[in-house]
Amino acid sequence: MNTLKGRWWRWVGIVGMVVAGLQYAQAQAQEVLPHAAVAMSHHGYGIGGFSLFEPQAPTPAKAPFVVFLPGWTVTNPDNYGVWLDRLVKTGHVVAMVFYMDNSSTPTPTYTANVMLGLHNALAELAKPGHVQPDLSRFAIIGHSSGALEAVNYASEAADYGLPAAGLLFGVTPAASQVTQRWRWLPCLTYRYGSLPILPDTVMNTEPNWGQEAPAQRWSSCMMLRDVTRIPPDSHLVMVGADRDGFSRNEDALRILEGAAQVPPQQRIFYCMTTEPRSTDGQLALANHYFASALDIAYDNGSPQGITLFGDNPRLVARATERQRRRMEARQQQVVNALDDELWALFDQAEQVTFDAAQWTLPVTHTDQLAQTVGFARRTPYCIKPSPAP
């Protein structure tokens, strides 16, 4: 009897989640966006590669420009397909730039690889037949390691003769090499990967892309460049999450506090919180990966940057099985109210940056960080500030 009762309640829960999901999907379907179609073109998915997404139906001559930098080992746009679809249909030209072939790509080369990919994307967009990017409304979005690279781009774009982004929008920035407790994590790839430990050469970080030059050995991984070089007229929005057990919001804070040349009102932290949402009844988990939402229509055929372990068949088989489980998990990703909140935050960040609008969402300015972000029993947390009276 107890077993039947337990199963009965389990089915009630499953049915409830399905109904909530259908209700949420119905609500989403009611949103009418300015553009009804997306033109996609894929131009490689490794170093120097990029995918372009342009609004159609109607097709504008010019549109705001967004560069999207995905997370570590993500070389397929479909991981963020739902967000990409909304960005384009709200009138943006989007270039997703890839900065690695797989997890064996040396991390010190990521920034130069971003520069190369964007250089190639802008060259393609300059050809006839494309919607022209409006560089006066240029925003760069990054997730996880891509958020670090968005900041690195802002710091060094001028060195490569590339345009400055007015808005840097980083979602759960990854733990960089200066976050000591994580120093060992990405480095395991070098120890057991197809590259030798501490290679003697890395891709040259000067503007002559594609050449190799001697470099110092390194013992750390995700790189955060000099944030004091970010142009002072930039707007920085770093999005943290109250269940981000990986990067723990630490580098989001380090970026905002370190870029002191940018006025405090232009350095914003926003906390995504895990809680039941009244709109759909779902428990939306604000973890490191909450920004991902799969749409296979955006698949570029990439094998997802699977970790390559040289010629060791046992490690290759283990990595392949891990990748299979990741693919299955991606199929379960659903859009929830956290996505709506993130999209609304980016929309308002654009308005504040480019249209001199005022924040109405509960953002935290840099001088208020101590009141909203911290650690309790070694667990990171963040809270939304109380609305102004």
Image: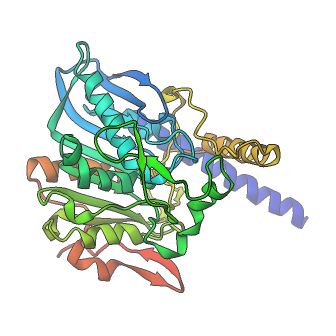
Look at 13% across and 60% down and name the residue there.
Answer: 232
Instruction: Please state, as top left, top right, bottom left or bottom right, where the N terminus lies in the image.
Output: bottom right
Percent from the top left, x then y, of residue 339?
Answer: 42, 49
Which image quarter holds the C terminus? bottom left
Identify the residue at image location x=75%, y=44%: 316
**Viewer-closest of 306 and 93:** 306
Return the residue nearer the eye: 284 or 149. Answer: 149
Q: Which is nearer the eye, 185 or 12?
A: 185
Q: How many marks?
A: 0
The image quarter containing residue 302 is top right
Residue 348 showing in the rendered view: no
Q: Answer left or right for 122 relative to 217.
A: left
- Which residue is pictured at 57% across the width and 47% down the height? 103
> Which x, y percent locates residue 386?
27, 75
Relative placement, left or right, of 193 versus 141 is: right
Q: Residue at x 41, y 46 (%)?
A: 213
